[in-house]
Image: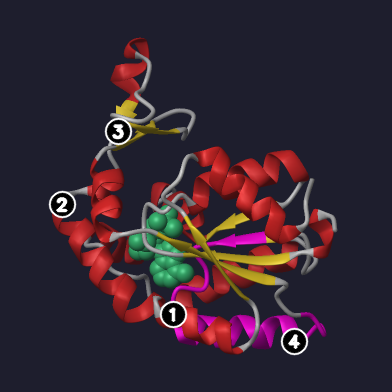
Amino acid sequence: MSARDHRLVFFGPPGAGKGTQARRLASEFGFAHISTGAILRKIIRADTPLGQEARRYINDGNLVPDRIVRILAEDAILDEDFSGFILDGYPRTLQQAEWLQEFLQSQNMSLTVAINFVLTDEEVISRLSQRRIHRLTGENFHLSNKPPPPEEAEFMISRSDDQPEAIQQRLKIYYRDTHPLVEYYHFRGLLCSIDASGAFSEVQSKICEVLQLP
Ligand code: AMP
C-alpha cells in the first residue's frame, strides 16, 4: 500500500511520540501530517481571536473545545482531498471521533487504521518534563535520551503545557476524554495498539509493518 491509500489517526497519551513518528512518516512516504496541536500553536502565535481563546485551554493542560478543533481538522483534511493523511492528535474525544467518521463518510471514505500509542504514566511524565523544543526549527529533544547540542542551548524552550501541573492535568484529561477511543476504534475494527516505549526506530518499524509500508 502507499501513503495515498491511507487515512490514519494517531492517538495516545501526551508525549507518546505521535508527532515525531508522524513527521518522519510524512517526510519518508509523503503523508500529509495534520497536527491539530501544531495548527493551534500557529493560530496562537498569530494572535487571532480563535488563537486567544485556544491559548487559555492549552496552557492549563485542557482540551480546546470540540467545535474549534473540528473546523481546523476538517479544513486540513479537505486540503488533502480526503486521503494520504495522518491525523496526529485528532480526534481526542468521542464527539470528535463521531464527527470525523461522518465527515469522511460524506465522501464515501473511512479511516484505514487508528494507531493507539501505548505508554505508562511514569514514562509520559519523564518524557514531557524533559522535552525541549528548538525555538526556530521546532525539532524535539529530550534532556537524557536526545540531548540538545550545547551550542544550540540558548534556542531550547520547554512548552508551556509541559510544566508539571499542566502535565498532570493533560494525563487526567487523556484518561477521561481520549482513552475511550480505544474501545470506540476496537469496536469498528480499526484499532491497532503499539507499544510506544521503545526506541524511535523500533516504533517506526512496527508502524510500517501495520501499514504495509517498506
Ligand atoms: P499536541 O501538540 O497534540 O500535544 O496538542 C497540544 C494541545 O493542543 C493539547 O494539549 C490540547 O490542549 C490542544 N489540542 C490539540 N488537539 C486537540 C484536539 N483534537 N481536541 C482538543 N484539544 C486539542
Residue denoted by label 4: 105
Span of residues in magenta: 86-109
Q: Does dot 2 land on a helix, a strand or a loop? A: helix
Instruction: First in sequence, mark 2 or 4: give its number.
Output: 4
State how far apart marks 3 and 4 are (Cα).
40 Å
Residue marked by disc 2: 164
Q: Secondary structure at mark 4?
A: helix
Q: x, y (%) of residue 71?
A: 56, 73
Mark 2 and mark 4 in contact? Answer it, CB < 8 Å: no
Marks 3 and 1 in Cβ contact (< 8 Å):
no
| Residue type at numbered disc 3 | Ile
Q: Are marks 1 and 4 in contact (CB under 8 Å)?
A: no
User: Considering depth in this image, is 182 or 77 the residue closer to the camera?
Assistant: 182
Q: Residues within 10 Å of mark 4 (few under 14, many from 20)?
A: few
Identify the amino acid type marked 4. Answer: Gln
Marks 3 and 1, the one that precedes in the sequence: 1
What is the spatial separation of the Cα atoms under label 2 and label 3, in whole angstroms?
15 Å
Which amino acid is tagged 2?
A: Pro
Q: Which mark is residue 93?
A: 1
